[in-house]
Amino acid sequence: MIRSKDIAYQNKDIASKVFAEKFKNVSLKVYGLDVPEIVRALPTNLPEIAANELRIDNLFELKDGTIALIDYESSYKKESKIKYLQYIVRTLERFREEGEYNIKLRMIVIYTADIRPEETEDTYEAGALTLRTETAFLSRLDSGRIKANLQRKVSAGEMLTEDETMEFMILPLTYRTEEGKKEALHESIRLASKIKDEETMVFVLAGILVFSDKIIDEESSKKVKEWIRMTKIGRLFEIEKEEAVKEASREASRETLKATAERMLRKGKMSVEEVAEYVPELSVEDIRKIQEGLLQTV
């Protein structure tokens, strides 16, 4: 199975973490994409092999072992295909750094309701290569039906199906105008906050934040993240995060102590036991291992 470098907890946004942990065995078919289920979400920051940094909207590992790069577009431009090629190259570079070479990629583009299928092209021919994108058009989703169904089920306290959960997350992007998207976003957030099942509520709110990243205002984003933090799941995350930070601090302190012991041993004026007395946080065995390492480098 493909491995990917983890993001340190202290650098992880709570919504992104919840989204990544819960987005397993989820299908994208409700959006009109005939691809295997998602195994896990991967970090979206791609290696910097040029002057600027690129960040793909979503990066998923699918059940068939392929990697799905997903970008959301509210307009169609042929030059965007060059951006997709950059995503592909940088994704391949990331896995090459991890020793993975046989990577199969899917470049998926999800168009918001602003774009119709007849306005786009899936293939980009450049002689030496051909780029084929897989596309989904949110203009094909019935915003009114989805909204009415979600309002009914949330008001009745009913559990949402997987497809309804996915529709909830993407609902703001099924509106055609910018004003319509933002209004639907705020309505979706208010409605999601009323979901009775806490785990579902947190997942939906996190998904709305992730999918609507390009249209959500900072104030709304902060408010949603605060709601998530106030839940049991959010509190558990904060405890987990604090423990991870403490552990990182302890490891850093231990490395500093080891460096101190190493400097003392290099001078050759103190025995292992004497260094252990000077650095009591390290055992005699720890210091002996440091000494053995120094001898091996001579």
Image (tube, rainbow, N blue to C red):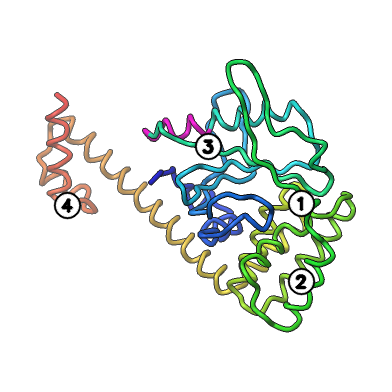
Q: Nearer the viewer, mark 1 or mark 4?
A: 1
Count how many numbered circles sit on residues in the image.
4
The numbered mark at residue 105 is 3
12 is within the stretch colored magenta: no
Secondary element under disc 2, as helix, strand or loop, is helix
Q: Decide which of 204, 268 is in the foreground and name it.
A: 204
Q: Secondary structure at mark 1?
A: helix
Q: Are marks 3 and 1 in contact (CB under 8 Å)?
A: no
Is residue 87 found left or right of 7 in the rendered image?
Answer: right
Q: Is residue 164 above or below residue 215?
A: below
- Marks 3 and 1 sit apart, C-alpha to C-alpha, by 23 Å
Alpha carbon separation for disc pair 1 and 2: 20 Å
- 3 or 4: mark nearer the eye: 3
Mark closest to the chain's N terminus, 1 or 2: 1
* Disc 3 residue crowd, few under 14, some 14–19, many 20+, Cα 10 Å: some
Residue type at mark 1 is Leu
Can you give x and y, in whole percent of width and height, for residue 297 in the image?
Answer: 16, 26
Q: CA distance from mark 1 to mark 4?
A: 62 Å
Tell me the kind of residue under disc 2.
Answer: Leu
Earlier in the chain: of badge 2 and badge 3, it is 3
Q: Quadrant of residue 26?
A: bottom right
Q: Among all residues in the image, which is located at the extreme top? A: 127
Residue 280 x/y as whole percent? 21, 53
Point out the tag, 3 or 4, that comes first from the N-terminus.
Answer: 3
User: Hey, what amino acid is under mark 3?
Assistant: Leu
Circle 1 is placed at which residue position? Answer: 138
Residue 283: image tag: 4
Residue bearing mark 2:
191
Which sits in the foreground, 203 or 8?
203
Q: Which residues are magenta?
A: 91-99
Instruction: Pick the residue in front: 244 or 87.
Output: 87
Foreground disc of the pair 1, 2: 1
